[in-house]
Image (cartoon, helix red, strand yellow):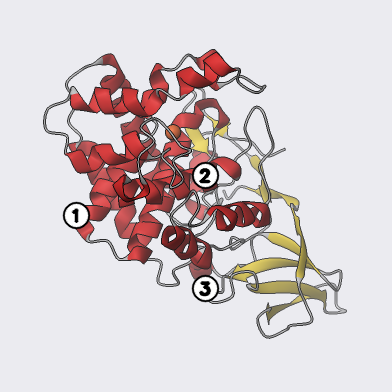
Amino acid sequence: MPFTLLDENDRVLLFQGQTVTEHFLKRLKQRGLTTVIAEIVEEIQEEAAKEDVSFETKVKTLSCLEDTMENLVKGCSVSLEPLEENVTSILEEVRAHEELVIPIVQLKRHDDYTFTHSLNVAIIALFIGRFIGLEEEELVRLGLGALLHDLGKLKIPQEILRKPTTLNQSEWQVVKQHPLIAKQLLDEQKGVEDLVKFVPLEHHERLDKSGYPLHLDPWEIHLFARIVAVADVYEALTSERPYRKALPLTEVVEYLMGNAGYKLDDIVVRTFVSRLSPYQVGDVVRLSDGREAVVSRLNPVLPFRPYVQVRTPDGKGGFVVEEIDLARSLTLTIVEELSLKSRVILPE
Ligand SMILES: [Fe+2]
């Protein structure tokens, strides 16, 4: 069972799903750990195994986000500058993805869902914003708004947010207040630009006016809020929640496409879906011929047909590694995602 590895002070050493690089192995070794269970990715070329946004940037942003949101909720005077610096760091890394494929964001911690959900939504929103062609300044405002989109939830009782069953009518009314609460908290601060407030206030508005809290007409919903609405729905549906399992990617894409132009912005959904990669480098999959393979490179044009590596015994006790371009091997498809575990010995 994969888990997040914490040190004695509950600080995160490794997140569930984090790639175990040489750097982390050394760090774990220094802390006296001798073995760790990890997924096999050793055959993957290092340059191909890049993440959407680095672990360090995610951890730094999460800690800044937690401080900022908690101080905003307490009513302290807060500067958004440190958070803005983190958005700029995320943007630099998002820009490094020449292949224009959105990897599935892996950083998940179920104990503080609001924060990790907000970070994941911001990363996805920045990818979409960049694909749509927003200017640098706009992207920074979009990123800030996305990071703070669920700020109001910090004022909603935990027993409602974590309720494992469907919310009743009155509980649902309480949850629906969170966009207005966020707007109010940001209004109380000096110097927060209106562009940052559109997302927290409007991310649950829908084009058919079925959203909340203001039931805006479609032309009134800010583009940033339309972008975050798509990122938010995607992130929520692909995450496991107390009341339901994570939905498979194909179902989530179906849902987004089904609501494009109806509840969600058509161009935003199409931009997002066309760049979405269903696989990460390092995913272990089963091919239609029964062989197990490891995703070695993504294909931005045909994201459902990445490059994979298969290992074939060489007859001398070793293996020959062969890379297959699934875009060219049309008789082969991925039929299943597997989770292969191996014991990795930490270096001396
Ligand atoms: Fe929300």
**Cα gap from disc 3 to disc 1, whole angstroms:** 27 Å
Residue 134 location (% of width, % of height): 27, 61
**Cα gap from disc 1 to disc 2, whole angstroms:** 25 Å
Q: Name the residue tied to disc 2.
A: 233
Q: In the depicted view, which residue is nearer to us: 70 or 218?
A: 218
Kind of residue sitting beneath label 1? Glu
Q: Earlier in the sequence, mark 2 or mark 3?
A: 2
- Tell which quarter ligand 1 is in: top left
In which image quadrant can residue 100 be found?
bottom left
Instruction: Identify the secondary structure beneath mark 2.
Output: helix
Viewer can see residue 9: no
Which mark's residue is nearer the viewer, 1 or 2? 2
Q: Is residue 140 above or below residue 303?
A: above
Quick check: marks 3 and 1 in contact, CB under 8 Å? no
Instruction: Identify the secondary structure beneath mark 3.
Output: loop
Question: With 115 as the anchor, is 196 left or right in this view?
Answer: left
Question: With 135 as the anchor, is 109 left or right in this view?
Answer: right
Q: In the depicted view, which residue is nearer to us: 168 or 144?
A: 168
Q: Is residue 321 above or below residue 160?
A: below
Viewer can see residue 151: yes
Mark 1 burial class by Cα count in 10 Å: few <14, some 14-19, many 20+: few
Kind of residue sitting beneath label 2? Val
Which mark's residue is nearer the viewer, 2 or 3? 2
Q: Name the residue tied to disc 1.
A: 137
Kind of residue sitting beneath label 3? Pro
Please give the name of the residue rendered at 22% of the width and 59% of the height, measured from the top-left corner: 136
Residue 211 location (% of width, % of height): 46, 37
Quick check: marks 2 and 3 in contact, CB under 8 Å? no
Q: Name the residue tied to disc 3.
A: 300
Q: Is residue 310 above or below residue 3?
A: below
Q: In the depicted view, which residue is nearer to us: 199 or 10?
A: 199
